[in-house]
Amino acid sequence: MTDQIPIIYWYRQDLRTHDLPGLLQAAQSGRPVLPVFILDDDTPGQWRLGGASRWWLHQSLAALMHEFEGLGGKLILKCGNAQKVLQQLLDETGADSIYCSRSYTPWAVQQEETLHASLSKSGMRFKRFAGSLLFEPGSVLTQAGQPFKVFTPFWRAARNAPTPPPPRSLDTSCCWYNYSDEAPTLEELALLPRQPDWAERWGDIWTPGSAGAERALDDFLAQQVINYSEGRDHPAMNATSHLSPHLAFGEISPRVIWQRALHCSEAYPERRQHVDKFLSEVGWREFSYQLLVHFPHIPERPFKPQFEAFPWLGSQQSLQRWQRGETGYPIVDAGMRELWATGYMHNRVRMVVASFLSKHLLTHWREGENWFWDTLVDADLANNACSWQWVAGSGADASPYFRIFNPVAQGEKFDREGVYTRRWVPELSQLPDKYLHKPWEAPAEVMDAAGICLGETYPAPMVDHKAAREAALAAYASIKTNVGRV
DNA sequence: TTTTGAGTTGTTCGA
DNA sequence: GTCGAACAACTCAAA
């Protein structure tokens, strides 16, 4: 009775049931399907999930388990080395096949290859399906057959490439495998923070899971997208999609985003420019993934090799002030505190704080990358690594070295009324707009009236902008001579 | 092979 | 206050 031999569907980064080709094919086989999620903290090494991501994962798994109940099935949880756990499951259930959604992070690619080799030796089938991206890495190449290193031509080529396949739903008539052996509960995975529970109120801000993701997309395309191109730069405006954590955990398929966004463009031609801008942000995710696949050292080493010689400084103490939002530059501190309080930071502010760490504090971008990895609910290896390298100047298509964000000018330009800054740095809330982004310039009577004492109630700026800028330019100049010699 | 045009997100300076 | 130019070459991608 081969049709009774179960298929294991192995969940990792794509925590949904909709538009998941591997799950669909398993279900269509008519054989019983056993969906399993394995928490593997063994294989990823330094890139095991960070704290904020674990909180999200817990909520997302709860949502996915609920989805399976609605489908009449049950998602099984396991933890440990995924290869061993899967081998055990094959033995226990008599399954002969494992399906999954293909991964692109270097450790996961390695893990899949090892698994593939060992399974094919024992006659088992291991099938990987494309589910996380619009364009498979390697499918969009230059005319010379090379990966793109510049975003604009990459995205132009992608948009001219065959369009991603339309999303496909799961049939309702699936046959699920009845797994009765022991498996940990969600609580036993111990993904939630305790003592202290710093995520206590995150449930008010976020709705992890596919339903929350779909709602975020629909709301965005119905409302915020109308003014996305400009609004997206203003952190107080709530003009962005907030889809990043949903995408990072695959709760929504990028093909669904693509299809609905284009549909929105067709229905409302005046939104087209904004929709295109939004899609190009999704395009940056695609770009980062294809860079990561072709240059797997990107999370650890500079993309531009001359940056190996960059004279990074940065003390543990200054890193800590940046992490805690105590730099004395209000827009930087607002961003770092938003991150700590919510597991998220507005994109514009991410650039400002990243520029500040790497250029004003001359701290290695990997310190920032690690901090973001641990604290962001949308932490994504490809986006995180490529974006940090972009800001630091060592990445592909990077920000030029002389582009050093002025945190005062950025605050005044993008948070003119100070709504964002006052929200996250409340000790400055009484300061007039004119001085909000540079409290050290406020006259004594203004500071008194606002109840602020620099160095006591709010830190004095930890570096002088002008001096820091010049030091950064000098540091960058020092590796340029290296380029000439190579 | 060589040539040519272009490249996410900025800042500062001087007119 | 506003505007344009300089920043500083370099690498990429296509013709």
Image: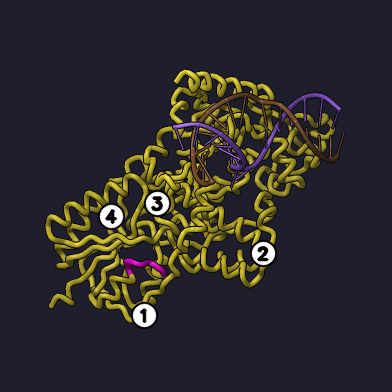
Chain colours: A yellow, B purple, C brown
* Mark found first going from the N terminus, 3 or 2: 3
Q: Give amino acid for label 2.
A: Arg
Q: Give the residue at x 44% y 21%.
A: A486
Neighbourhood count class around disc 3 (C-alpha, 10 Å): few under 14, some 14–19, many 20 upward: some
Residue at the disc numbered 2: A271
Are labels 2 and 4 on one chain?
yes
* C-alpha span from label 3 to label 2: 29 Å
Asked whether, in this view, residue A95 is left or right of residue A227, the answer is left
| Front residue (pair A203, A39) | A39
Using the numbered discs, state the Cα–Cα distance from disc 2 to disc 1 in whole angstroms: 35 Å
The image's mark for residue A172 is 1
**3 and 2 marks in contact (CB < 8 Å):** no
Instruction: Report the chain holding disc 3.
Output: A
Q: CA distance from mark 4 to mark 3?
A: 29 Å
Q: Which residues are magenta?
A: A19-23
Q: Is residue A289 magenta?
A: no
Disc on res. A79? 4
Q: CA distance from mark 3 to mark 1?
A: 32 Å
- Mark toward the start of the polypeptide (2 vs 1): 1
Identify the residue under disc 3. A137
Is residue A54 at least partly visible in the picture? yes
Looking at the image, which residue is at 69% across and 53% down? Answer: A230
Give the number of the mark in front: 2 or 1. 2
Position of residue C1 in the picture relative to residue A402 (left or right): right
Choose the circle earlier in sequence order: 2 or 4. Answer: 4
